[in-house]
Image: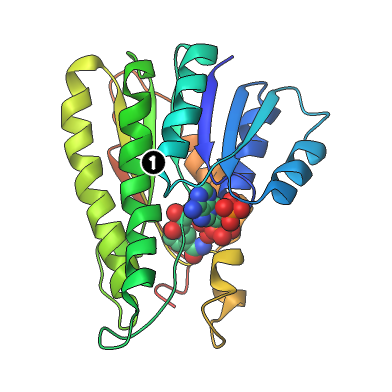
Amino acid sequence: MKNVVISGGTSGIGRQLVHLFLDEGHNVVTFSRNKKKLNKLFNEVKNFPGKLSCMQCDVSKPEQIKKISLKLKKDLKTVHYLINNSGTNSLGTIDKIKLNDWKKIIDVNLTGPFYLTQCLFSALRKNSVVLNMGSIASKTGFPNWSAYCSSKFGLKGFTESLREELRPKGVRVIHAEVGATNTAIWDDLGDGWNKDSMMNEKEVALVIFDNLKLKNTVNIDEFTLMPPAGIL
Ligand SMILES: NC(=O)c1ccc[n+]([C@@H]2O[C@H](COP(=O)([O-])OP(=O)(O)OC[C@H]3O[C@@H](n4cnc5c(N)ncnc54)[C@H](OP(=O)(O)O)[C@@H]3O)[C@@H](O)[C@H]2O)c1
């Protein structure tokens, strides 16, 4: 039985990962902002073999991250899997994007994962795994997506530095570069997206879950998952 911390486990890929870990009997903690969604998740997994703890926390608020991290470290001692999954997006051309929208995306997608990792650092031990949820937008720029791309390029840089800092400790660090997946994150991005060609969230979570399993002599530093149709 392992201790698993997943940010943003109430929806999309994160929710599917919560299901997969609970199904294998692990001890899972997740957090997000919306209390109703946290209660719904808690009720839907009541009969799974693993135990779920839900916390209300906004990953962009350092004081909230600090508070839940202190509790997590006290309760769990070791975090075997840390999955920085919470994410947000809003679109706008560079001449029009509002500074607050830019800051929110950077705070949620980049500073949040950094600070959560820092606060849980001492609970990461030999054979723990950190997985950061990147995107095809971690390595490709798209028009209107400058804030999201900047946050995800930044997260990739953070992940690569983290990997080297944790290597002597025997903690493995994985960067998942995920292409378009049919989740709620697209709902606020306007019309015109071809959701039928996107990857299915369950299948994406399953591949991520499989890649988290440790091999003795093989590290998975990063991997890319794409819809068969490519960039949509
Ligand atoms: N779907 C895609 O096409 C795609 C592709 C590449 C990468 N990704 C990445 O995959 C990750 C999961 O995205 P998804 O597609 O599964 O999206 P989703 O269905 O919208 O789920 C996002 C999750 O993050 C939580 N969240 C958002 N803002 C938060 C905040 N400030 N504090 C704490 N939790 C927050 C949400 O809960 P609350 O709103 O209740 O807080 C929700 O549980 C993200 O990092 C995303 O960038 C997605």
Q: Which residue is mark 1?
A: 62
Point 44% across, 73% down: residue: 90
Mark 1: which amino acid?
Answer: Pro
Q: Quadrant of residue 136?
A: bottom left
Q: Is mark 1 within 8 Å of ligand 1?
A: no
**Across the whole image, how many numbered discs are drawn on residues?**
1
Q: Residue furthest front?
A: 63
> Where in the figure is residue 108, as x and y percent of width and height?
40, 54
Judge by depth and name the residue closer to the eye, 91 or 199.
91
Judge by depth and name the residue closer to the eye, 183 or 109.
109
Residue 82 is at least partly visible in this image: yes
89 lies above or below 113: below
55 lies above or below 81: below
193 lies above or below 83: below
Point 34% across, 67% down: residue: 148
> Where in the figure is residue 24, as x and y percent of width and height?
66, 25
What quarter of the picture does the C terminus occupy? Answer: bottom left
Point 17% across, 38% down: residue: 161
Judge by depth and name the residue closer to the eye, 41 or 131.
41
115 lies above or below 109: above
